[in-house]
């Protein structure tokens, strides 16, 4: 198993499924999002909202859950906010790279908490 994955997956276990799904989108946009140029390790609300399809109110309430769990941090002021993974959340990069190499959907691991493919 990946070295930092268990701690992240344990933390995600206490987060509601919709917030875990949003976390997957954030991870994808942080590392592979279409918005360029932008600072490395940053996603913007606009690109996340476009990718996830949530309404703005639901998006911000789920974002708050992820922030309260110390998985993300939000910097800047509306509408120029920047979303970054925290040190706890940054283990998702290792999982994302592994999932890409093994052709495993990131959502299965981070949102579904399925660790069988990480063995």
Image (tube, rainbow, N blue to C red):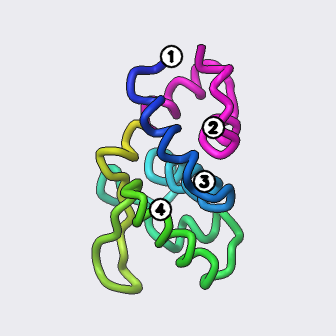
User: How many C-alpha atoms fall within 10 Å of the one at disc 1: few (<14), some, or many (≥20)?
Assistant: few
Q: Marks 2 and 3: which is nearer the front?
A: 3
- Residue at the image position 67 percent from the left and 42 percent from the top: 107
| Mark found first going from the N terminus, 1 or 3 | 1
Q: Secondary structure at mark 4?
A: helix
Indicate the position of residue 45 as horizontal and vertical percent values: 49, 72
The residue under label 2 is: 106
The residue under label 4 is: 66
Q: What residue span does the magenta drawing correspond to? A: 92-119
The residue under label 1 is: 1
| Mark found first going from the N terminus, 4 or 3 | 3
| 99 part of magenta stretch | yes
Real-space CA distance between mark 1 and mark 2, rounded to the nearest whole angstrom: 15 Å
- Which residue is more in the foreground, 14 or 96? 14
- Residue at the image position 59 percent from the left and 74 percent from the top: 59
Q: Examine the rendered structure and indicate whether residue 15 appears above or below residue 115.
A: below
User: How many C-alpha atoms fall within 10 Å of the one at disc 3: few (<14), some, or many (≥20)?
Assistant: many
Q: Secondary structure at mark 3?
A: helix
| Mark found first going from the N terminus, 4 or 2 | 4
Indicate the position of residue 66 as horizontal and vertical percent values: 47, 62
| Mark found first going from the N terminus, 1 or 2 | 1
- Residue at the image position 34 percent from the left and 50 percent from the top: 41
Real-space CA distance between mark 4 and mark 1, rounded to the nearest whole angstrom: 24 Å
């Amino acid at each position: 198993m990946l070295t930092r994955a268990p701690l992240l997956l344990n933390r995600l276990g206490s987060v509601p499924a919709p917030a875990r799904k949003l976390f997957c989108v954030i991870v994808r946009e942080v590392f592979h999002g279409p918005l360029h140029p932008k600072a490395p390790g940053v996603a913007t609300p606009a690109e996340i909202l476009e990718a996830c399809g949530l309404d703005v109110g639901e998006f911000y309430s789920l974002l708050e859950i992820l922030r309260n769990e110390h998985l993300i941090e939000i910097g800047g002021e509306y509408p120029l906010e920047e979303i970054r993974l925290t040190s706890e959340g940054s283990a998702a990069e290792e999982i994302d790279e592994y999932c890409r190499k093994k052709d495993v959907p990131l959502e299965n691991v981070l949102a579904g908490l399925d660790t069988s493919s990480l063995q």
